[in-house]
Amino acid sequence: MFHRIAVPYDSSQPSRVAFECALEVAVRFGAELRVVSVVRLPEPTTRVELHAVIEEGERHFRDEFQELAKRAAESGLALQTEVLEGHPADQILRAAERFGADLIVMGRRGRTTVGRWLLGSVSERVLRDAHCPTLVVH
């Protein structure tokens, strides 16, 4: 039923819960699991600020991905990850399509300092515009 599951992740508690839910579904169906994080770029921005924001975001999420990969390995799955830049809903939708996801599992609201990108409006837009079923957890 589900072969490829995409999980938008911003380090918030709702995104952690979404990851755990997606991991459980992936194990049950033998699905591939991809975690997608988005660094939201400030507007307007200078070139120096842009590079700093991207580097800091990538560093933050790569550290987080190590923990998630360990958790996935404990369940017998290899974890795929990617960090993208831009508007969160746009990037999540594009990433899920490129991956060929047949399920998106995401948190309802992000509240961390680094992860304020996953707001209710983002999950609402992904839910509305996704090419596949979307499960929103909190």
Image: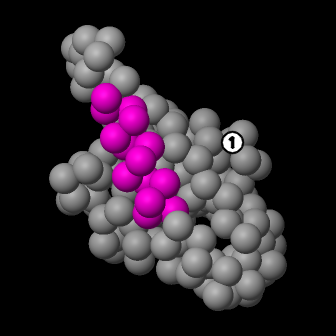
| Residue at the image position 51 percent from the left and 37 percent from the top | 84
For badge 1, the amino acid type reads Glu
Residue 130 image position (x, y, % from top left):
58, 46
| Residue at the image position 58 percent from the left and 78 percent from the top | 70
Determine the image quadrant of residue 9: bottom left
| Magenta stretch: helix, strand or loop mostly | helix
| Residue at the image position 73 percent from the left and 77 percent from the top | 77
Question: Which residue is disc 1 drawn over?
Answer: 97
Q: In which quarter of the image is the C terminus?
A: bottom left
Read off the magenta span.
52-65
Q: Looking at this view, is 11 or 101 the one in front?
A: 11
Q: In this view, does 109 lie above or below 52?
A: below
Q: Is residue 32 above or below residue 26?
A: above
Q: Looking at this view, is 25 or 133 the one in front?
A: 25
Circle 1: is it few (<14), some (14-19), or many (20+) Cα within 10 Å?
A: some
Q: Is residue 26 above or below residue 61?
A: below
Residue 64 image position (x, y, % from top left):
44, 63
Residue 55 image position (x, y, % from top left):
39, 35
Instruction: Judge from the rendering whether residue 132 lies leftward or rightward of residue 40; answer left or right.
Output: right
| Residue at the image position 31 percent from the left and 72 percent from the top | 13
Instruction: Residue 64: say if magenta.
Output: yes
Instruction: Judge from the rendering whether residue 111 lies leftward or rightward of residue 77; answer left or right.
Output: left
Q: What element carries label 1?
A: helix
Instruction: Residue 66: say if magenta.
Output: no
Q: In this view, does 2 lie above or below 70?
A: above
Q: Looking at this view, is 67 or 121 the one in front?
A: 67
